[in-house]
């Protein structure tokens, strides 16, 4: 598996123009070995998944409090990591890709927010 280090985001699994998968991972994660290994393992799982959007895979690691605290520390120390939360990503070679999980998450938050406001009588 080809691994490309970048200085933004956390990590992403992309396909190149030939349909071969590769992983981009933030080079600063090497300073957090436990987090690095966990994130790399997660991205390698994407290479095994044949689904267009594997929500189960994304949700699997989401509720590990210890990991989330380490991730928050990383985000705060390296603000470019916040680009991971964008629904559209750009790889090191200029390739753009949409993150379907983030798009779905934002839609749920927006619809939930409007529903809550409507429920309490704000609209």
Image: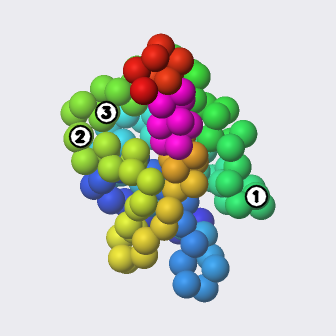
Tag 1 and tag 3, C-beta contact below 8 Å: no
Q: Position of residue 60 (x, y in %)?
A: 67, 32
Quadrant for the N terminus, please: bottom right
Q: Residue at x 31, y 43 (%)?
A: 82
Observer-nearest of 52 and 67: 52
Circle 1: is it few (<14), some (14-19), or many (20+) Cα within 10 Å? few
Specify start and end residues of the magenta stretch as a single range.
Answer: 106-115
Q: Secondary structure at mark 1?
A: loop
Badge 3 marks a residue whose secondary structure is helix
| Local secondary structure at mark 2 | loop
Residue 64: quarter of image: top right
- Residue 78 numbered tag: 2
Residue 48: x and y in percent read 74, 57
- Of tags 2 and 1, which is closer to the observer? 1
Compute the Cα span from label 2 to label 3: 6 Å
Quadrant in which residue 52 is drawn: bottom right
Is the residue marked by circle 2 packed among few (<14), some (14-19), or many (20+) residues within 10 Å? some
Question: Contact (CB < 8 A) between labels 2 and 3?
Answer: yes
Which residue extends farthest right? 50
Q: Is residue 119 above or below residue 17?
A: above
The quadrant in which the C terminus is found is top left
Q: Label 3 belongs to which residue? A: 74
* Mark 2 / mark 1, whichever is N-terminal: 1
Q: Residue at x 37, y 60 (%)?
A: 5
Q: Which residue is mark 1?
A: 51
Q: Is residue 37 visible?
A: no
Q: Kindly report the distance in space between the C-alpha atoms of the residues bearing marks 1 and 3.
A: 29 Å
- First reached walking from the N terminus: tag 1 or tag 3: 1
Is residue 93 among the parts visible in the rendering? yes
């Amino acid at each position: 598996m080809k691994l490309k280090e970048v200085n933004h985001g956390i990590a992403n699994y992309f396909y190149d123009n030939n349909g071969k998968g590769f992983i981009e991972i933030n080079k600063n994660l090497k300073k957090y070995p436990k987090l690095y290994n966990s994130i790399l393992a997660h991205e390698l799982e994407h290479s095994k998944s044949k689904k267009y959007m594997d929500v189960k895979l994304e949700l699997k690691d989401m509720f590990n409090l210890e990991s989330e605290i380490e991730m928050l520390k990383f985000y705060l120390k390296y603000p470019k990591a916040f680009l991971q939360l964008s629904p559209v990503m750009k790889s090191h070679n200029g390739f753009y890709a949409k993150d379907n999980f983030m798009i779905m998450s934002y839609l749920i938050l927006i619809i939930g927010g409007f529903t809550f406001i409507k429920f309490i009588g704000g609209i």
